[in-house]
C-alpha cells in the first residue's frame, strides 16, 4: 500500500508541475485504487513483453507526431520527456494489477527474451515503481517552474522513497536528520552555484558580448591573411538556394584592415518595421522589376545574419520575430534556432548602402610600400580611374593563380607583400584584400566582403547547393555613384576545389537531400495540406507494429480472485488444486506447497499417495520457478495425477 501511495503522490506532483493536474489525479487514482480492488490479473512474462511493447509503440507514435508537428520547435524532445510518465503508464498498471506485482527484467530487453529458451537462464524480477517515480520526477522538472515548491516536492518524494529501503542500524531520528540536512545543503548549493554564475557573467560581460558578436552578428575579423581555416576544407552543405543564375551572397562587410585582419568600424543595428515581410527601403515599395531569391538553411543561434545579394530591398523570413540592418547593408533576424527558409527581392541598383567614408580609402603603412610597388610595376597610375577596376582584374587573371597551399618563403615580408610581389598565388582572401588596398591607394573607396559563391546546381532539387568550401571573399568598390562587387579571384578556383571532392560525397549528399526535402515539406505546410494522409500513415505504421509484435494480445488477461492465498495465485491450473483441496485436508494460509503435501501424506487418507505427492510437489515447483517452454504439458500432467488420486 505504501508503494501505491508513493506513486500516486508522484503522479499528482507531476500533474501539478506540468499544468496537467486533472490527468495527474486520474492516473494517481488508478494506481492507488489497485489496493482496494478484489481481483488480480494473471499476467505471464510473455504478456509483460506485450505491455512493454505497447508502451514502446506509444513512445514511437508520440515521437513521430512531435517530429511532424513540432519539428521546428527546439524543445520538442523536452515535450516528449514531459509526457513520458503517461507513455510508460501501461507498464505500471500491468505491475500493480498483476499477481507477482513485479516486472520480469527480460521484458525490458529483447536480447534477454531470446535467452528464456535456454534452460540455464533464470528470470529475475524488479520493482518498476521506483524507476517510474524517478522518471515522473524528471518529467515534472521539464516544466521548469523554478519555484521552491518543486524542490520541496522533489525532496519529500525522494525522502519517502528512501525511507522504505533505509538502513535499520540508524535510528529514525538520525536518518531523518541526515537526510533533511542533505536536501537543505543541496538547495543552498543550487542557489550558490546560480549566484556564482551571475558573478562570472558580470565580471566577464565584455568577453561574453564579444562571443555573442562572433556567433550572431558576423561583425568580426573574417580572416587573418595567410590562414584560410577549415571552412574551405569542408564539403558540408551550408544552404540551398533557388535562383535564376549563379551569384554572390553577402554575409559581412569590413572596412578596417589591422595587422593582416579585417574588422568593422560601425556595429550599430537598426530595427526594421514589420509588415508584409520587411521592406528595407520605402522608396522601392512600388518597384515592378526585380529578382527573387529563396534560401533554405539551418542556424544554431537566436540571431542569424542572412546571406543575401547586394541591393536586397525586401525580406520575408518565416517565423522570424524581428529584423535588423546596419550601415553596411547587412541583414540580421531574430528567430528560434532550427530550419530556416527566407525569400528576398533585390535589384541591380545600389539604394541602401551608406556613402564612402575616410576609412574606405585608408591604407595601412605596413602594406603601403608593397602596394605602391605593385602599382608602379603595372603602370596603374596611368590608367583612367573608370578603367582601373577592369585593368586590375586582367592583371590578376593573367599573372596570378589560385591555391590553398600557401607557404611564405620570406618570413620578413608580410603575407600580402609575399603574395603580390613574390609567390603570386593564394586564395580568395589574398585577392580580395589586395584589390581593396590597391583601389584605395588609387583613390577609389573600397571594402572587404565575405559570403558565399553560388554556382553548383542540383537538377533533382532544382536548387543551387552552397557548400561550406564555397565560402568566398571579394571586394566592394565605389564606382559611378554606387557600390559594386569586384571579384578578382581567378575563376579556376572552382575547378581547383572540385578536384578535391571525396568519392563518397554523392551518397552523403543523397542522404542530406532526403532530410532537407522532408524539412522543406514540413516548412511549406506539407503536413497541414496532407493532414489526413499523415495521420493515416502514422496509424497504419503503429497498427502494423502492434500486429507484428502481437501487442493486442496484452488485453486478453485472466482475472484471479484476490482472496486466494498468495501461493495459489501462482498455480498453473486453478481447477487442479481446487480438486485436490476437495480430496485432501485444506491447506493453511501459512503453509508452503511442500508442507501441505507432507501433511497429506501423513494423513494416509489418499491411496498411492507417497509417490504421487512427491511428483505433484516436483512438478508444481518446476512450473513455478523454472524457465521452460512446456509449462502447459506440466499443467496437464498435474491434472491427470490429481484426477487419479482416490480416497481410502
Image (cartoon, helix red, strand yellow):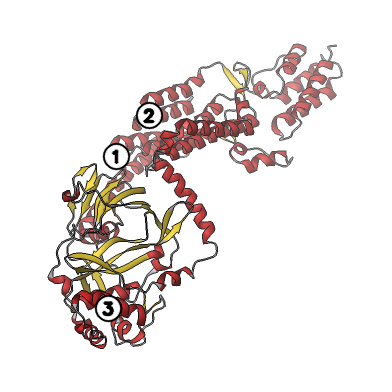
Apparent side of residue 170 relative to residue 417 in the rendered image (left or right): right
Which labelled disc corresponds to residue 15?
A: 2
234 left or right of 57? left
**Residue lying at 62% horizontally and 41% vertically, measured from the top left:** 110
The answer to which quarter of the image holds residue 122 is top right
Characterize the local packing of mark 2: few (<14), some (14-19) or many (20 or more) Cα atoms within 10 angstroms.
many
Q: Secondary structure at mark 3?
A: helix
In the displayed structure, 401 sits above or below 116; it is below
3 or 1: mark nearer the eye: 3
Give residue 224's quadrant in the image.
Answer: bottom left
From the top left corner, tell me how far across and down residue 431 is, in percent.
Answer: 31, 75
Seen in the picture, residue 441 relative to 53 is either above or below; the reply is: below
Quadrant that contains the C terminus: top right
In the picture, the disc for residue 400 is none
- Mark closest to the chain's N terminus, 2 or 3: 2
Per the model, the C-alpha gap separating discs 3 and 1 is 66 Å
Relative image position of residue 238 (x, y in whole percent): 39, 58
Along the polypeptide, which appears first: circle 3 or circle 1? 1
Residue ID for mark 3: 391
* Residue at the disc numbered 1: 146
Q: Which residue is farthest left? A: 358
User: In terms of depth relative to the viewer, which is nearer, 84 or 355?
Assistant: 355
Amino acid at each position: 500500500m505504501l508503494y501505491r501511495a508513493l506513486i500516486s503522490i508522484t503522479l499528482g506532483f507531476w500533474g501539478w508541475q506540468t499544468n496537467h493536474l486533472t490527468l495527474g489525479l486520474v492516473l494517481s487514482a488508478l494506481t492507488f485504487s489497485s489496493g482496494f480492488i478484489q481481483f488480480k490479473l494473471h499476467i505471464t512474462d510473455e504478456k509483460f513483453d506485450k505491455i512493454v511493447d505497447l508502451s514502446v509503440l506509444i513512445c514511437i507514435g508520440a515521437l513521430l507526431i512531435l517530429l511532424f508537428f513540432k519539428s521546428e520547435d527546439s524543445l520538442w524532445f523536452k515535450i516528449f520527456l514531459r509526457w513520458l510518465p503517461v507513455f510508460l503508464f501501461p507498464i505500471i498498471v500491468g505491475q500493480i494489477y498483476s499477481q507477482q506485482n513485479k516486472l520480469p527484467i527480460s521484458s525490458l530487453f529483447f536480447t534477454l527474451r531470446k535467452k528464456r529458451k535456454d534452460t540455464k537462464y533464470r528470470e529475475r524480477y524488479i520493482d518498476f515503481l521506483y524507476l517510474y517515480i524517478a522518471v515522473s520526477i524528471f518529467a515534472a522538472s521539464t516544466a521548469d517552474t523554478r519555484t521552491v515548491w518543486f524542490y520541496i516536492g522533489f525532496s519529500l518524494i525522494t525522502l519517502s522513497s528512501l525511507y522504505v529501503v533505509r538502513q535499520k542500524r540508524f535510528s529514525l531520528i538520525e536518518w531523518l536528520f541526515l537526510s533533511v540536512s542533505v536536501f537543505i545543503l543541496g538547495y543552498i548549493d543550487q542557489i550558490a552555484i546560480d549566484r556564482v554564475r551571475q558573478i562570472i557573467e558580470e565580471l566577464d560581460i565584455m568577453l561574453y558580448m564579444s562571443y555573442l558578436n562572433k556567433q550572431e552578428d558576423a561583425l568580426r575579423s573574417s580572416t587573418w591573411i595567410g590562414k584560410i581555416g577549415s571552412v574551405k576544407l569542408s564539403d558540408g552543405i551550408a544552404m540551398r538556394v533557388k535562383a535564376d543564375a549563379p551569384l554572390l551572397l553577402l554575409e559581412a562587410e569590413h572596412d578596417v584592415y589591422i595587422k593582416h585582419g579585417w574588422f568593422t568600424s560601425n556595429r550599430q543595428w537598426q530595427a526594421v518595421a514589420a509588415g508584409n515581410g520587411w521592406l528595407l527601403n520605402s522608396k522601392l515599395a512600388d518597384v515592378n522589376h526585380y529578382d527573387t531569391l529563396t534560401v533554405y538553411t539551418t542556424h544554431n543561434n537566436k540571431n542569424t545574419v542572412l546571406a543575401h545579394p547586394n541591393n536586397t530591398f525586401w525580406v520575408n523570413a518565416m517565423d522570424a520575430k524581428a529584423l535588423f540592418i546596419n550601415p553596411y547593408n547587412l541583414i540580421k533576424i531574430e528567430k528560434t534556432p532550427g530550419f530556416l527558409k527566407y525569400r528576398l527581392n533585390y535589384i541591380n541598383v545600389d539604394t541602401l548602402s551608406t556613402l564612402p567614408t575616410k576609412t574606405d580609402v585608408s591604407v595601412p603603412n605596413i602594406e603601403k610600400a608593397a602596394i605602391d610597388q605593385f602599382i608602379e610595376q603595372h603602370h596603374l597610375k596611368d590608367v583612367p580611374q573608370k578603367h582601373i577596376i577592369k585593368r586590375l582584374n586582367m592583371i590578376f587573371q593573367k599573372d596570378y593563380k589560385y591555391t590553398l597551399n600557401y607557404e611564405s618563403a620570406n618570413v620578413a615580408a608580410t603575407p600580402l607583400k609575399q603574395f603580390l610581389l613574390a609567390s603570386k598565388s593564394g586564395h580568395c582572401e589574398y585577392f580580395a584584400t589586395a584589390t581593396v588596398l590597391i583601389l584605395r591607394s588609387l583613390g577609389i573607396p573600397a571594402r572587404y566582403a565575405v559570403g558565399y559563391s553560388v554556382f553548383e546546381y542540383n537538377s533533382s532539387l532544382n536548387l543551387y547547393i552552397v557548400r561550406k568550401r564555397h565560402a568566398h571573399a571579394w571586394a566592394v568598390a565605389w564606382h559611378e555613384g554606387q557600390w559594386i562587387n569586384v571579384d578578382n579571384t581567378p575563376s579556376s578556383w572552382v575547378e581547383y576545389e572540385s578536384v578535391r571532392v571525396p568519392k563518397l560525397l554523392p551518397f552523403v549528399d543523397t542522404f542530406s537531400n532526403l532530410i532537407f526535402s522532408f524539412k522543406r515539406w514540413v516548412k511549406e505546410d506539407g503536413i497541414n495540406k496532407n493532414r489526413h494522409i499523415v495521420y493515416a500513415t502514422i496509424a497504419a505504421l503503429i497498427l502494423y507494429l502492434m500486429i507484428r509484435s502481437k501487442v493486442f494480445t496484452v488485453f486478453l488477461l485472466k482475472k484471479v480472485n484476490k482472496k486466494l492465498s498468495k501461493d495459489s495465485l501462482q498455480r498453473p491450473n486453478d481447477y487442479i488444486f481446487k480438486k485436490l483441496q476437495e480430496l485432501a485436508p485444506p491447506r493453511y494460509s501459512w503453509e508452503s506447497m511442500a508442507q501441505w503435501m507432507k501433511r497429506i501424506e501423513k494423513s494416509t487418507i489418499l491411496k498411492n499417495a507417497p509417490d504421487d505427492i512427491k511428483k505433484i510437489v516436483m512438478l508444481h515447483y518446476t512450473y513455478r520457478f523454472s524457465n521452460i517452454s512446456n509449462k502447459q504439458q506440466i499443467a496437464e500432467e498435474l491434472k491427470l495425477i490429481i484426477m487419479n488420486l482416490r480416497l481410502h
